[in-house]
Amino acid sequence: MESFLQIQNNERLARADIPHLPFFQFRNEMLAFAKDGAQVVQFFAYEEEGSMKMLAVMRTDKLYVAGCDAPEDDKFPALTAESEKFHMFEREIGEQYGLKAEGHPWLKMVRYHKNYTGKKDVFDNDYSQDIPGNYPYFTVDGETVHEVAVGPVHAGIIEPGHFRFQCCGERVFHLEIQLGYQHRGVEKLFESVPFKRLPIIAETIAGDTTIGHNLCQAQAIESLADLKVDEGASIVRTIALEMERIANHIGDLGALSLDVAFNPPAAYFGRIRGEYLNLSQILGGNRFGRGLVRPGGVTHIMGDEQRQLLSEKLAELTPEVEHVNDLIFSAPSVMARFDDTGTVPYENAEKIGLVGYAGRACGLSYDARVSFPTECYADLPANSNARTDGDVCSRATVRREEIMHSTAIINTLLEKKVDAASYIPPEVNLAPDSFVVSVNEAWRGEVSHCILTDGNGDILRYKVKDPSFHNWTGLALSLRDTGISDFPLCNKSFNLSYCGFDI
């Protein structure tokens, strides 16, 4: 990356210091970087004073940033034609700002909304962006081929999403996933609401990732407003993020057991998950972490009483968790369903940039807690993964390992008797003409928030990326040449967010 600027996680930069390249130099350097193994953290467009611009954040073991002016004719040769890593990003840029990635092999809408600039639809398809319906799904021809459509309305409380399978008998040739049914315009809300509402919106991007998203938002604002966070608040934030990780992994391991008709672990883990949610309430006053993390600190102080309650309950729950995991992973009937099911090879995982436990289960070692540590993570041990075959069993095993690793982290932090300062909502003035990108390892994987401010210190562009933005494509690939009856199992092994994707 000859011209890209190396940056730090949560580092505030003057926008004038970000390299602004000619478009084709910008494009070529990103492609060269991706070919050498770099992944995309952010790649988006924005409008300023009637001019369209683009900005990218790439990562190796470091972060890099650069920008450019968009081509004047609103068209550019697709990077996706040469590297799959840009696939979703270019589709989103087309939908949001009417910039067309020509030659993109899969140029379709991401969510259902008109682009921000009022430009003409770039997708060249005969359907309305206002009404979900006439979406051009991929089809497979042949006398023995049949199509199965599932959703967007599902049984129970699952969120809306449509799954279109092309099958021959039970074998899946191709799965296409279409989301966007609950697009809320989160990014535009961030740019228009009063400052005090920013954390409330961040907490609801994905309800099961309250801490992950709100931590990114808080850290980005702290960087732009030069707010300092004391050690006690960092300890509480780190514990909260790990507690969120444990609760979700436990819930999903129980659900995986249920999907293979092994009901006892599902019942046990359903109850145990509730116990961890209750621990989150002891820590921050809410079972799902809402209202705890705010720019400048945390709203609840963890005193000796809370430390004791958390320590005692963790000591009680940890052997129960280990016992239930032993039930799951020692059952031959369970392993027969988990092993070699829904496999995503390392090569494909790297090409599409899988993140989080889905990526680590394929052998991609990336963990933002290690590569770009925030809060207390620089002083905490990293996790390791014993099984990385890319199948359901690997994804389940990584979750099991992360539960125990997170438990050890929390116990370590509870031994540090450092109280957070009393939280007083600060007067916030964001630095003008500035940039910051925040990266954290939420329970599904890499969450990133990026903020650009204008000359008055107002938010010019707020960009959100949930790990599901990378990983839905991985779920589709996991169904290739797999029985359609294994879809619920594969789906739960990823357990991706609909609303985190739809934003």
Image (spheres, rainbow, N blue to C red):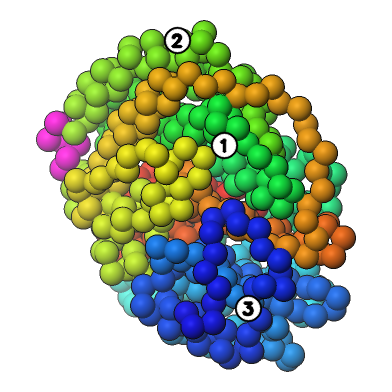
Tell me the amino acid under the disc marked 3. Answer: Pro
Residue 146 or residue 153, whichever sits in front: 153
Circles 1 and 2 in contact, beta carbons < 8 Å: no
Q: Going from the N terminus, do you reach mark 3 or mark 1 first? A: 3
Q: CA distance from mark 3 to mark 2?
A: 50 Å
Q: Which residue is mark 1?
A: 211
The numbered mark at residue 308 is 2
Give the SS element for disc 1. helix
Percent coordinates x, y for residue 203 in the rendering: 65, 38
Residue at the image point whose x is 41% and y is 71% from the top? 38
Q: Which residue is mark 3?
A: 19
Label 3 sits on a secondary structure element that is loop
Q: Position of residue 284 (x, y in %)?
A: 59, 22
Residue type, label 1: Ile
- Which numbered disc, 3 or 2, marks the residue closer to the eye? 3
Report the residue at 49% width, 34% height from top. 238
Q: Which residues are magenta?
A: 330-336
Kind of residue at badge 2: Gln
Label 3 – label 1 distance at C-alpha: 32 Å
In this figure, what is the number of numbered marks?
A: 3
Say few, some or many: other residues with alpha carbon within 10 Å of mark 1 (under 14 / 14 to 19 / 20 or more): many
Q: Nearer the viewer, residue 208 or 442?
A: 442
Image coordinates for residue 83, horizontal then vertical, percent: 43, 79
Q: Position of residue 425 (x, y in %)?
A: 77, 31
Quarter residue 32 falls in: bottom left
In which quadrant of the rendered view does residue 324 lie?
top left
